[in-house]
Amino acid sequence: MGASCRTSAFGTMIASMSDSPVPVGAPDDIVRLQRELAACRAELQALREEQRTFADGISHDLRAPLRAIDTFAALVEKDPGLGEESRQHLRRVRAGAARLGGLFDALLELSRAGRADLRLQPVDLGQVAEWVVAELRDAEPARDAQLVVEAGLEVVGDERLLKSLMSQLLGNAWKFSRDRDHVSIRVGGERIGGRLHVGVHDAGRGFDMAYAGKLSQPFQRLVGSEQGGGHGLGLAIARRIVERHGGRLSARSGPGPGASFLFDLPAASAG
């Protein structure tokens, strides 16, 4: 039972169940199940505390020396007697510190995606997508970008986590369209039963489907760092958020340019 307590879907179910007492005279199987559920709740709570401690350590204990490295490297770089070769070395040090800072941010986001309490509410996923792309445009206003969002992408979920989900997927599409004349992204969906099946499609570089299995593995990349790959946590964050909402995330690419990321979320009521 212990291993199953750690799965996302089962963990979400356990966390949402009430702590109502077992009725007097209940069958032994019910009593045993209630005890196992209580044990799972305790295990999940312990895991959340462990993740919180880990996140706090990253936020404070690791960031302080990283800031010191960047600050003192910047001060030394201003020395007028420094040679160009030494300046280049210092720029590499500062670039490495910035990359490590980005990795810390991603680790924190991965931790939050797994431990944050879900605050479920109706969310317009299309509006969230437009919000994210507006932020990307603000950061790089010179880029020619087109976003097409289908109407009716209404879901039920945690708005903050869904914003993070779309930031990871749309940011990925934006980054891997860097060698194209313009960025072209389409977000669409289809309701099947009580789920909305969503696709984020781009016309960027794409990836080799032989490596699609890396999607679920933190620190793994669909493309190498020399091709613009990041820290290898963005898609792991996206996957964890989708799983927290009871869905699955998959990726598809080729033949031809572009990639598609497909996932499903609880659909909002039709009425």
Image (tube, rainbow, N blue to C red):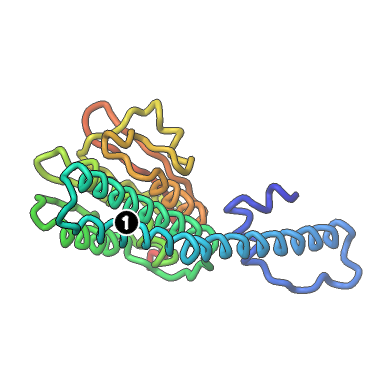
Residue that lies at the very extreme toward the front in this rendered image: 81
Q: Regarding mark 1 in the picture, which secondary structure is present there?
A: helix
Is 177 displayed left or right of 102 in the figure?
left
Q: Between residues 171 and 196, which one lies in front from this camera angle?
A: 171
Amino acid at pointer 1: Ser
Where is residue 271 drawn, in percent x and y? 38, 68
Where is residue 187 drawn, in percent x and y? 26, 50
Query: Residue drawn 81% across and 62% down?
Result: 35
Query: Residue drawn 88% across and 61% down?
Result: 27
Q: Quadrant of residue 184?
A: top left
Query: Residue drawn 43% across and 55% down?
Result: 265
Query: Residue drawn 64% across and 59% down?
Result: 47
Where is residue 95 drawn, in percent x and y? 28, 49
Is 144 displayed left or right of 106 in the figure?
left
Is 95 displayed left or right of 62 in the figure?
left
Residue highlighted by disc 1: 167
Image vertical order of residue 45 relative to residue 147, above or below: below
Where is residue 232 drawn, in percent x and y? 40, 43
Q: Residues within 10 Å of mark 1 (few under 14, many from 20)?
A: many
Image vertical order of residue 6 relative to residue 257, above or below: below
